[in-house]
Amino acid sequence: MKQIPENDAPRLQTKRLHWVLELLRNDYERPGDFRFFVTSQHVLLLGLILHLCFFPIFWTLAAWELATFNLVSIGAFFVALVLNKRRHETPALIIAVVEVTTHAILAVTLMGWESGFFYYILVPSPVVLLSPRWHLVARLSVPSLSAVVLVALHQFSATMTPKYELAEATTRLLYEFNLVSTVFALTYISFFYQRGAWDADEKVSALTTELQRLARTDPLTGLLNRRAITELMTEEVHRYDRYRHPFVIVLADIDNFKRVNDRYGHKTGDAILKHVSQMIGTHARKSDQISRWGGEEFLMMLPNTNLHCAYQSIERLRKKLETEQLALSASPLTVTMTFGLCEYNPSEGLDRCIAAADERLYKGKRQGKNQVVPVPEPQADHTCSPTAT
């Protein structure tokens, strides 16, 4: 049958595919980018919270240099959070690494090695190693430099007297607090990186499913497209070869569709296509497969059905269609369809069955339209069960 242009359907399909691809990309070139974004955002937030906790500690201990620097640290982590949220992960990470290392060096210098602030120098290394945007050399340089800083700081602290000589109990309490905070931070990093992996996998899975659905669905009617129904018919042929369950191919075409399209416009034509799709879908069984074959033409595959039962079912559908009136214009419209049927025959093959159904469809058009034409003629002595109709 002559195919009518599908109006805005290709544009709509392209727009939807671009939308899904944009979501899938979503500024993250690789799955690791999304996982790292989730991890770094939570780690930066944790760093901000820890520095908010440090300020009253330094204030209580009258460590004014550290208290003042801690205000700068709070501002630095806030800026890093904003940058990271805007997808500027690299500068945000650099700010965090520099701040943590500088703060730890300053705290050890003023309060001594026994205060335990050196532990925080260990925290940036795993975060940097997880970054997918940094080159391998750059990622390895941070833990290497951290090790050098730790050794140098330990050597330096052994030969100097801290400015703030704290009570032994206070020093021990600080040491334990910093140790626990470091262990918690490393655990926090591991947890949210794994959580980011789960979130990324779920997101990719959901969008992949949507892409697969769009690739198999007609955008206007929501029915299967030609590619999808062809795959299902091939599967049904394999099922027939194994179990010998009959199935029928039905080709259907809306009568006088071009005339309606030309007279009332493509908007009305689209509404008719949607209406017919809904009518067929309501009439069909759950096992039946319905597709938009092209233009105003539809292909249906009726599994576990012989030609006689399929003829009875499609004839009821035809009568139902011709009694429905659509209020889509100034005067109600009646939509009719012509159907060509063919029961699959393994000796002839699937392509020949589709061609035979198409020939019967042409025959029905020549004979006056609005009719069901099977091939071969159905036998009248078959009994159809309710599930087959």
Image (cartoon, helix red, strand yellow):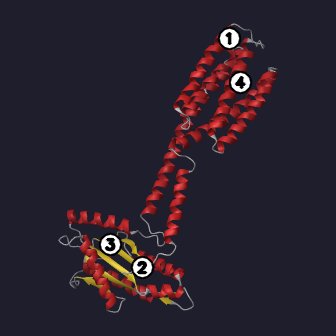
Q: Earlier in the sequence, mark 3 or mark 1?
A: 1
Q: Earlier in the sequence, mark 1 or mark 4?
A: 4
Q: For the residues labelled 3 and 1, say whether their Cβ atoms are less than 8 Å apart.
A: no
Find the distance from the CA under tag 4 to the CA under tag 3.
71 Å
Q: Nearer the viewer, residue 386 or 302?
A: 302
Q: Earlier in the sequence, mark 4 or mark 3?
A: 4
Q: For the residues labelled 1 and 4, say whether their Cβ atoms are less than 8 Å apart.
A: no
Which residue is most to the left?
A: 347
Q: Residue at x 44, y 85 (%)?
A: 257
Q: Which residue is mark 2?
A: 296
Residue type at numbered disc 1: Phe
The label number, if any, that marks residue 301 in the structure image:
3
User: Is there any visible trace of residue 266 in the rendered image?
Assistant: yes
Q: Residues within 10 Å of mark 1 (few under 14, many from 20)?
A: some
Residue 87 lies, in percent from the top left, at 63, 44
Q: Nearer the viewer, residue 380 or 21?
A: 21
Find the distance from the CA under tag 3 to the CA under tag 1.
82 Å
The quadrant of the image that shows the N terminus is bottom left
Of circles 4 and 3, the one toward us is 4
Q: Is residue 172 above or below residue 220?
A: above
Q: Secondary structure at mark 1?
A: helix
Residue 192 lies, in percent from the top left, at 57, 38
Q: Which residue is mark 1?
A: 156
Residue 222 lies, in percent from the top left, at 46, 70
Residue type at numbered disc 2: Glu
Q: Secondary structure at mark 2?
A: loop
Find the distance from the CA under tag 3 to the CA under tag 2.
17 Å
Q: Nearer the viewer, residue 56 or 92?
A: 92
Q: Is residue 267 above or below residue 177?
A: below
Q: For the residues labelled 1 and 2, say whether their Cβ atoms are less than 8 Å apart.
A: no
The label number, if any, that marks residue 103 in the structure image:
4
